[in-house]
Image (cartoon, helix red, strand yellow):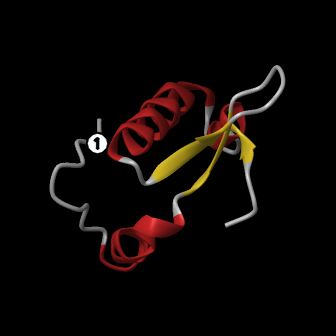
């Protein structure tokens, strides 16, 4: 908790042709609740939802998404 970033930064570091996919994954994580939005002036900021920490760690460690998460 406490750290957040502009949604547009999620695609940083991806090749030009993969940026749209990175943005789509970000939208899917938001829809699933693994990411949450922080109200900010003029920008869309997101952060990892601490209530979903177990699911986030499992996804990172095993590559297995939680039930209901539909990634593009």
Q: Position of residue 57 (x, y in %)?
A: 42, 76
Relative to 67, does residue 55 appear above or below in the rendering?
Answer: below
- The residue that appears at 24% across and 48% down in the rendered structure is 69
Identify the secondary structure beneath mark 1.
loop
Residue 71 lies, in percent from the top left, at 28, 42
The image quadrant where one finds the C terminus is top left
Between 44 and 71, the residue placed more toward the observer is 44
Q: For this rendering, which residue is in front, 39 or 13? A: 39
State which quadrant residue 55 falls in: bottom left
Q: Can you say which quadrant of the picture contains the N terminus? A: bottom right
Q: Residue at x 50, y 25 (%)?
A: 20
Q: Residue pushed farthest right? A: 41
Residue 34's image quarter?
bottom left
Residue at 37%, 37% in the rendered image = 31
Q: Is residue 1 above or below residue 17?
A: below
Question: Foreground residue, 21 or 65?
Answer: 65
Tell me if residue 63 comes above or below residue 35 in the rendering.
below
Q: Which residue was labeled with disc 1?
A: 71
Left or right, residue 39 beside residue 51: right
Query: Which residue does the image show at 69% across and 29% down from the upper left?
Result: 44
Name the residue nearer the viewer: 49 or 14. 49
On the image, the x and y values in percent for residue 50 come to 53, 68
Furthest residue to the left?
A: 67
Q: Position of residue 45 (x, y in %)?
A: 70, 38
């Amino acid at each position: 908790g406490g750290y957040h970033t502009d949604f547009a930064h999620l695609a940083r570091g991806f090749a030009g042709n993969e940026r749209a996919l990175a943005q789509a994954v970000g939208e899917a994580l938001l829809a699933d609740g693994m990411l949450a939005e922080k109200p900010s002036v003029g920008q869309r900021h997101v952060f990892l939802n601490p209530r979903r920490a177990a699911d986030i760690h499992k996804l990172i460690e095993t590559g297995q998404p939680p039930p209901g998460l539909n990634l593009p």
